[in-house]
Image (cartoon, rainbow, N blue to C red):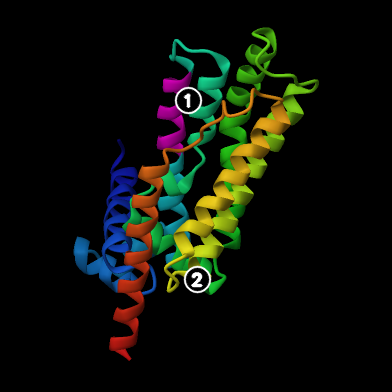
Amino acid sequence: MRKGEESKKKIIDAAEKLFARKGYANTSVQDVLDELKISKGGFYHYFDTKMELLAEVCRRRAEEWYAAGIAHVRGMRAGAVERLNAALRLMNTLDRESPALLGAMTEVGLAGEDAAVKSELRELTLGMLHPLVEEILDSGVQEKQFVVRRTGETARMLILLALDVNDLATAQILANHHSPECAYDVLEMLDTYRESVETLVNAPYGSISLFDMSDMVGTLSRLVSSLEEKTRGRSEGR
């Protein structure tokens, strides 16, 4: 790794830890500088803004996650239904991100500042996962597990739907994390998505299980607690 690439990686590593620990809003560029003991010039040589740094953190996390997940799914000795469950689970942000980092990312969504980051991550996700999902649908048609006429277009639709559901679930959490019922509302939304996937690919009823319910409840509870803690911290700091 070249010296410049190594320096950039250190900044991204430090930012990811700080965003997870303190939240995006409570982490300043100066915090990153202090963590690494570097000058402002050393930071702004690689990033113009803190938001650009967050985008890089998200991009790197997504690329690593998807690359490892795609390799795992392609190596599975399983039928098309099980592999589709595994492939679509890769896009379930709530199932994979650490609650602390996810809480930092959702703060940005609350401020309405994340449009460019979302757009870039959507394109990255679609580009990396579309070939995999299309392969699985083709295999499922041959196995007579799915009934799909246009596997390429259906694969694209499944991915875009998953991304939209993630956005809706995040928005629901941001708007209602003070409510005890928030987690259950999100779970209902995710279950509706699961049923929609079965309908789109004409899979056997009950065969699609994109997440473990108990794990999801735990993740949502930790995320809500993380958001509550950051909200209290901002209030006390005023």
Type of amino acid under label 1: Ile
The residue pinned by badge 1 equals 70
Q: Which mark is residue 193?
A: none
The N terminus sits in image quarter: top left
Q: Quadrant of the C terminus?
A: bottom left
User: How far apart are the two marked residues, 2 and 1, measured between alpha carbons?
Assistant: 34 Å
Task: Say if 233 sits above or below 156 in the image.
Answer: below
Q: Residue furthest bottom?
A: 238
Q: Please provide percent x and percent y for residue 174.
A: 49, 68
* Badge 1 element: helix
Question: Residue at point 43% right, 59% down?
Answer: 54
Q: Is residue 61 visible?
A: no
Residue 57's spot in the image, x, y percent?
A: 40, 52
Task: Please say whether residue 170 is one of the residues in the magenta stretch.
Answer: no
Q: Residue at x 55, y 47 (%)?
A: 190
Depth check: give the residue in front, 177 or 164: 177
- Above or below, 8 against 53 in this view is above
**SS class, disc 2:** helix
Residue found at the far right of this picture: 149
Give the quadrant of residue 71: top left
Percent x, y for residue 205?
A: 63, 27
Q: Residue at x 68, y 8 (%)?
A: 142
Image disc number at residue 176: 2
Tell me: residue 197, above or below residue 110: above
Between 80 and 151, the one lying in front of the other is 80
> Please, what is the three-letter code of the amino acid marked with disc 2?
Asn
The correct choice, above or below, for 6 with respect to 37 in the image is above
Residue at left offset 43%, top offset 74%: 178
Q: Do the CB atoms of the residues marked 2 and 1 lie less than 8 Å apart?
A: no
Q: Position of residue 206 (x, y in %)?
A: 58, 29
Magenta span contains residue 70: yes
The magenta stretch is 63-73
